Image (cartoon, grey):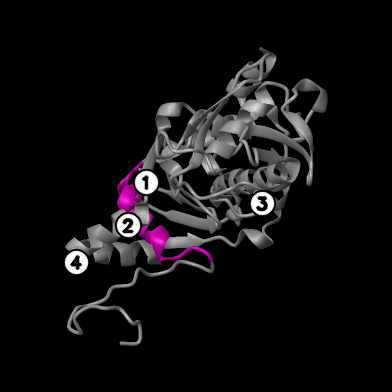
């Protein structure tokens, strides 16, 4: 047929309904998978990717937006960035004082070929805590020999190699700070729309390509996720696929998906003044309002 799907001509094809310009059927599928639309408590769902789609709500109402985080967490626009596949540095630990770097690579003993989103978040959070970066995300060259001049300005060596070292550059860090600021601003803006705060949120569901590799602690230090009790966060994996499986097995759940899309209010953040204010405030590590990150504030004093 027109879709060029190689299946029996009698097989029905179901397409998840969209909500708005940048909130598609994958997000409806994700909400279905989390069951947040059945929860009486206020919940947040975030799909960390190019569009950074966010849904807040509960069993009574749902509100969605896309915060245009950009593709940097998936490797685009980052000098040695890559998706969370074999050979990607997924976790980074920088030791204070010595600035030695310990890495973990997807695939176990595989040699690192680049760094994925979770590794970037780990690295930048630790670079900040160890004094390599200031709150503006700028490198302090005198702090460590791993900081050097490169083709794109200052760069930090995450992993030394014989041929070409794996580095994070200042432009890389600027891109990541912009992305994390957009995500946090998306959370804050949607909560303001319903006169709520992070204190009211009982659950944060995290989905996305590298969600299962993400360190909640490091994402909070960076200022991408809110500083909330850690038990409120839950990894959900690829929720678009999970929701699809559910709908393949149940007409009732397909009807639920349709209802989710109809009940969900879409907020266009690009024309929202509050979002822009929140975005600018988030362009620091972790944020201009450090009191919103009490556990990070304590770490900064150590």
Report, in whole angstroms, how far the alpha carbon at label 4 lies from the one at label 3: 38 Å
Report, in whole angstroms, how far the alpha carbon at label 2 lies from the one at label 1: 9 Å
Residue 151 seen from this side: yes
Please state which of residues 32 and 14 is positioned toward the viewer in this rendering.
Answer: 14
As drawn, the label of residue 237 is 1
Query: Residue 23 vs residue 251: left or right?
Result: right
Circle 2/circle 1 CB separation < 8 Å:
yes
Q: Residue at x 70, y 31 (%)?
A: 289
Which element carries disc 4, helix, strand or loop? helix
Which element carries disc 3, helix, strand or loop? helix
Which element carries disc 2, helix, strand or loop? helix
Q: Position of residue 149 (x, y in %)?
A: 81, 37
Q: Name the residue under label 2.
A: 241
Q: What stretch is highlighted in magenta?
A: 22-40
Q: Magenta stretch: dominant SS?
A: helix
Q: Where is residue 2 in the image (x, y as percent from the top left)?
A: 35, 87
Q: Which of marks 4 and 3 is nearer the N terminus?
A: 4
Which element carries disc 1, helix, strand or loop? strand
Circle 3/circle 2 CB separation < 8 Å:
no
Q: In which quarter of the image is residue 99?
A: top right
Please check the rendered image and state whether residue 28 is part of the magenta-colored stretch, yes or no: yes
Q: Mark 3 points at which residue?
A: 275
Query: Residue 134 vs residue 33: left or right?
Result: right
Location of the C terminus by quadrant is top right
Report, in whole angstroms, how far the alpha carbon at label 3 lies from the one at label 2: 30 Å
Report, in whole angstroms, how far the alpha carbon at label 2 lies from the one at label 4: 17 Å
The 10 Å Cα crowd at callout 1, few under 14, some 14 to 19, many 20 or more, is: some
Please check the rendered image and state whether residue 241 is part of the magenta-colored stretch, yes or no: no
């Amino acid at each position: 047929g027109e879709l060029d799907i190689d299946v029996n001509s009698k097989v029905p094809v179901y397409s998840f309904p969209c909500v708005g310009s940048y909130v598609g059927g994958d997000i409806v599928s994700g909400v279905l998978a989390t069951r947040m639309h059945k929860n009486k408590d206020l919940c947040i769902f975030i799909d960390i990717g190019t569009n950074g789609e966010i849904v807040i709500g509960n069993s009574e109402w749902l509100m969605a937006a896309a915060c245009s985080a950009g593709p940097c967490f998936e490797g685009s626009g980052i000098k040695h960035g890559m998706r969370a596949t074999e050979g990607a540095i997924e976790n980074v630990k920088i030791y204070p004082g010595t600035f030695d770097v310990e890495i973990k690579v997807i695939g176990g003993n595989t040699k690192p070929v680049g760094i994925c989103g979770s590794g970037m978040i780990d690295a930048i959070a630790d670079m900040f805590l160890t004094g390599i970066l200031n709150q503006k995300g700028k490198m302090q060259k005198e702090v460590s020999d791993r900081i050097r001049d490169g083709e794109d300005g200052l760069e930090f060596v995450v992993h030394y190699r014989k041929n070409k070292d794996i580095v994070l550059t200042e432009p890389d860090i600027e891109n990541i700070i912009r992305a994390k600021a957009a995500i946090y601003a998306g959370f804050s803006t949607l909560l303001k729309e319903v006169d709520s705060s992070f204190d009211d949120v009982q659950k944060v569901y995290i989905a996305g390509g590298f969600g299962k590799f993400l360190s909640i602690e490091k994402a909070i230090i960076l200022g991408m996720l809110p500083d909330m009790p850690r038990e409120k966060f839950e990894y959900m994996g690829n929720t678009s696929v999970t929701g699809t499986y559910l709908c393949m097995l149940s007409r009732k759940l397909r009807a639920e998906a349709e209802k989710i899309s109809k009940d969900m209010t879409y907020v266009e953040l690009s024309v929202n003044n509050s979002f822009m204010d929140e975005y600018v405030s988030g362009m620091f590590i972790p944020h201009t309002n450090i009191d919103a990150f009490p556990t990070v504030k304590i770490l900064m004093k150590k």
